[in-house]
Amino acid sequence: MDVSATAAPGADDAGAVQDWVDAQSEIVRTDEVEHYWDTLMRQYGGWFPNGNPSFQEALMPGGDGFSLANAASGLLQFLLHEVVVNGKLLAMIVILTVFSIVLETLQTAFEKTTVSKVAYAISYLVIVVIAINSFHIAIQFAKDAISGMIHFMTAMMPLVLTMLASMGNVATVSIMHPLIVFMIHTVGNLVFFFIFPLLFFSAVLHIVSTLTDKYKVTQLATLLRNIAIGTLTISLTVFLGVISVQGATGGVADGVTLKTAKYVAGNFVPVVGRMFSETTDTVLSASLLMKNAIGLAGVVIIVLIAAFPALKILALAFIYNLAAALLQPLGDSPVIGCLQTIGKSMIFVFAALATVSLMFFLAITIIIAAGNVTVMMR
């Protein structure tokens, strides 16, 4: 009897929290987040072993609709598919490169080499055009992914911050809302209009340097690339530093405020003060569960928005690096240098996309942690 009497309040508290969670799930509008999830499932849901899991299945603890193992398996299958699809590109590059190397060899075999020089120049220009076009496609993949992440973050922030406000995180919301919006759009514009153009011009200058031995601009190309990567690194540091400091400061301030309000209500308000304090704990616990669930869904969506375009870029980079590796035994040709340059430049585009996705990933986790700090301090 004593044991059951002791366990009953805990069961009642858990039931009350669950009731509040169910009530909040009906009130809170998650249409914007579900829209992005449904779009991802329409585009890439076929790569998951269990088909297209719904948004509710993705959030269900222990559900069969979505899991990390299924996601990893689907991403691996997608990467292998992209490599196989780009096999035609690899075959075309290898054939054109072999043809250009043969023409380059013929230039020294005959006294009159005008025809072979023209043919070599044409074949080389064709390879250059294909390489630059592939690099432009890779940049477009990265731009589309970053644009999708920016739009998703813009749609998700009001929902997450509303959940924070329901937990009493007034200071955190007032600080984070304008800061997050400003930082997200600043990073996006910086990547679109500064970092990606620098990477593109760096790749073009490296390719131009392979056309002739007399005029080289590799130092300028390397400088542009280093400026782009350095700017991206500084942006990551500033973004995470500002958001983490402001989030921690707001979380501590809200925690102290809530703890003070709870103490005052529980000790100085007669009769109903203690009951009000306990009810507040139940509501805050339910809001915490809802906020963490929505934040977890946001983290998963951010990862998936960036993962599939990133794998496409990796597949293209692998194709060009593989082509350069296979053709290296044929000699030190400028064409091989061009292929190596494009493969390396695509890796830098992938790094830029991964860095931006890491910023948004950590931004969501920092916001979630700020709410958790408040609950811990109360």
Image (cartoon, rainbow, N blue to C red):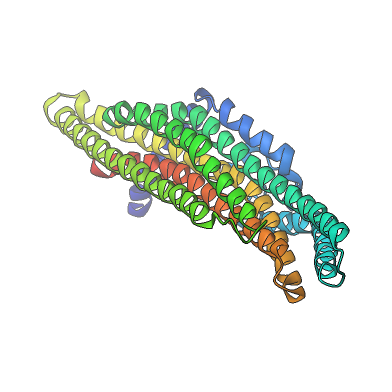
Q: Residue at x 38, y 50 (%)?
A: 4
Q: Position of residue 154 (x, y in %)?
A: 49, 28
Q: Residue at x 73, y 60 (%)?
A: 319
- x and y, in percent, of residue 332 in the image: 70, 71
Report x, y in % for residue 33. 57, 31
Work out which quarter of the rendered image holds the C terminus and state it. Answer: top left
Of 300 and 95, which appears nearest the observer?
95
- Against 94, residue 32 (above or below) is above
Which residue occupies 44% across, 37% down? Answer: 187
Work out whether residue 163 can be spotted.
no
Residue shown at the point (66%, 63%) measured from the top left: 337
Regarding residue 176, the answer to whether it shows in the image is yes
Find the residue positioned furthest to the bottom: 329
Q: Quadrant of residue 133?
A: top right
- Name the foreground residue: 248 vs 212: 212
Residue lying at the far left in this picture: please name it: 268
Relative to 372, is 185 above or below?
A: above
Relative to the observer, which residue lies in front, 256 or 235?
235
User: How many marks are shown on the rendered structure?
Assistant: 0
